[in-house]
Image (cartoon, helix red, strand yellow):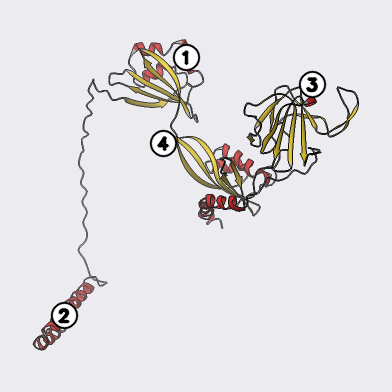
């Protein structure tokens, strides 16, 4: 290295006489080269460096004592779960309420009745007190509830009021693999049963969850959870889901229409909702079919152009499809009668009703499954039942055997709006599937 340095200096001495500026440029380059060689030598393998020493230092930190003035007006908050066998008065004392007058009022029979159903073991009790133990408020929040019962001191007396909790909505994502059942897979993934029920409902048109499930089927779901002060209160809507059943991929995305209605569609814009429900009643029996029959009132043979469902008086009658109220009122032998129009050529009719739902008015838009009226025996009827008709271009069809149309798929601008609204969810679902199952594949 010394030989290299001598050669560089001799060369620079000659250059300095010929071209001083060039000499300084070369001097800088030479010094940089020498420093680089020195650095390389310093980190060359085999060289020894001084060992690094460590030292442990332990110091005692003293906590600053909390000083609470007796005239401090800020509330002192304590929170705990209500215990088995605990009364409201004893729970207040346990959480710092020292006023005997207040705890005595907590056992008031009237207040006890107001707290019934809310004050129970496992519910959260949040108590705010003064520095001296006076009660400011006590809030009782049952698990999963989005309201609380708040007890406050008003003019020296305890008063209870129901209040809605301010909720924050967060979006969660989770995936799972079916080993035995959908509910077991949900439990393994830490998801509530309500999501399993909702997935079964959404994909019920494609998958029979009683017979079609196989070991190794996969699901991914993006859903909402409502929180209050960092605590999960309840599970909300499913925003997007994917289910791989026997190798077939099924998707569902929640789409909000311009009129505010929400429905689930697959990635191609096909609705997961049935076009028409087969029956407008959940629990009933067919008492008279679509055929010629002996009329129960007139005793003559007449064509029966609908289906009669026997059900108790007041049973809720539901719209079998989305539609618009075309007629509501009384009509001859039908008694209280409703006609709904669905798209262009389909109408359904509901007769002998005891009454109408409040929102049923001519021109009103009705969603599938909405209660529109109640079973009765108005018009030409011998007992409580529902007369139901299904018409295509005003021609009566047998509701029990007619091929029911599917729900309309999204097209045109609506399909474009759907894709714009759900593109981000589709990307998240794809990423979720890939990241969760890369080891399985």
Q: Residue furthest right?
A: 300
Q: Which of marks 3 and 2 is nearer the N terminus?
A: 2
Q: Position of residue 435 (x, y in %)?
A: 50, 54
- Measure the C-alpha gap from mark 4 to mark 1: 29 Å
Check residue 112 in the rendering and tell me which mark sits there, or answer none: 1
- Identify the residue under disc 2: 25
Whether residue 410 can be seen here = yes
Check residue 345 in the rendering and tell me which mark sits there, or answer none: none
Q: Earlier in the sequence, mark 2 or mark 4?
A: 2
| Tag 3 and tag 1, C-beta contact below 8 Å | no
Q: Where is residue 40 in the image (x, y as percent from the top left)?
A: 23, 73
Mark 3 vs mark 1, foreground winner is 3
| Tag 3 and tag 4, C-beta contact below 8 Å | no
Looking at the image, which is closer to me, 422 or 226?
422
Q: What element carries label 2?
A: helix
Check residue 383 in the rendering and tell me which mark sits there, or answer none: 3
Mark 1 vs mark 2, foreground winner is 2
Q: Where is residue 429 in the image (x, y as percent from the top left)?
A: 53, 51
The quadrant the C terminus occupies is: bottom right
- Measure the C-alpha gap from mark 3 to mark 4: 55 Å
Q: Where is residue 160 in the image (x, y as percent from the top left)?
A: 43, 18
Q: Earlier in the sequence, mark 3 or mark 1?
A: 1
- Measure the C-alpha gap from mark 3 to mark 2: 112 Å
Image check: 356 left or right of 164?
A: right
Check residue 230 in the rendering and tell me which mark sits there, or answer none: 4
Q: Is mark 1 on a helix, strand or loop?
A: helix
Q: Which of marks 1 and 2 is nearer the N terminus?
A: 2
Q: Which of marks 3 and 4 is nearer the N terminus?
A: 4
């Amino acid at each position: 290295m010394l030989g290299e340095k001598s050669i560089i200096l001799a060369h620079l001495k000659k250059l300095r006489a010929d071209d001083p500026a060039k000499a300084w440029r070369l001097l800088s380059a030479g010094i940089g080269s020498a420093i680089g060689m020195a650095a390389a030598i310093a980190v060359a393998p085999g060289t020894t460096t001084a060992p690094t020493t460590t030292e442990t230092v332990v110091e005692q930190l003293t906590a600053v004592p909390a000083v609470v003035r007796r005239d401090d007006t800020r509330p002192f908050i304590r929170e705990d779960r209500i215990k088995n066998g605990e009364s409201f008065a004893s729970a207040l004392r346990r959480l710092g309420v020292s006023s005997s007058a207040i705890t005595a009022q907590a056992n008031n029979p009237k207040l006890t009745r107001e707290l019934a159903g809310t004050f129970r073991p496992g519910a959260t009790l949040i108590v705010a007190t003064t520095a001296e133990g006076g009660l400011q408020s006590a809030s009782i929040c049952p698990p999963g509830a989005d309201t609380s019962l708040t007890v406050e001191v008003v003019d020296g007396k305890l008063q209870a009021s129901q209040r809605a909790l301010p909720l924050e909505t967060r979006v969660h994502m989770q995936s799972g693999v079916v080993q035995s059942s959908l509910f077991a897979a949900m439990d393994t993934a830490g998801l509530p049963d309500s999501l399993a029920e909702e997935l079964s409902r959404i994909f019920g048109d494609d998958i029979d969850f009683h017979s079609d499930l196989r070991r190794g089927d996969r699901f991914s779901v993006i859903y909402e959870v409502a929180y209050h002060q960092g605590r999960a209160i309840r599970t909300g809507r499913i925003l997007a889901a994917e289910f791989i059943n026997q190798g077939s991929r099924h998707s569902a995305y929640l789409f909000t229409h311009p009129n505010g209605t929400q429905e689930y569609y697959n990635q191609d814009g096909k609705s997961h909702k049935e076009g028409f429900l087969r029956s407008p009643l959940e629990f009933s029996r067919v008492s008279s079919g679509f055929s010629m029959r002996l009329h129960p009132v007139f005793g003559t043979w007449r064509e029966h152009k609908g289906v009669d469902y026997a059900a108790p008086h007041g049973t809720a009658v539901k719209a079998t499809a989305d539609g618009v109220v075309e007629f509501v009122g009384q009509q001859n032998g039908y008694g209280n009668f409703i006609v709904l129009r669905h798209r262009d050529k389909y109408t359904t009719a509901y007769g002998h009703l005891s009454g109408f739902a409040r929102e049923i008015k001519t021109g009103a838009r009705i969603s599938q499954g909405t209660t529109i009226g109640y079973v009765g025996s108005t018009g030409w009827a011998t007992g409580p039942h529902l007369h139901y008709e299904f018409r295509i271009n005003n021609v009566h069809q047998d509701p029990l055997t007619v091929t029911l149309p599917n729900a309309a798929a999204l097209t045109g601008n609506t399909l474009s709006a759907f894709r714009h609204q759900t593109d981000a969810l589709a990307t998240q679902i794809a990423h979720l599937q890939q990241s969760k199952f890369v080891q399985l594949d």
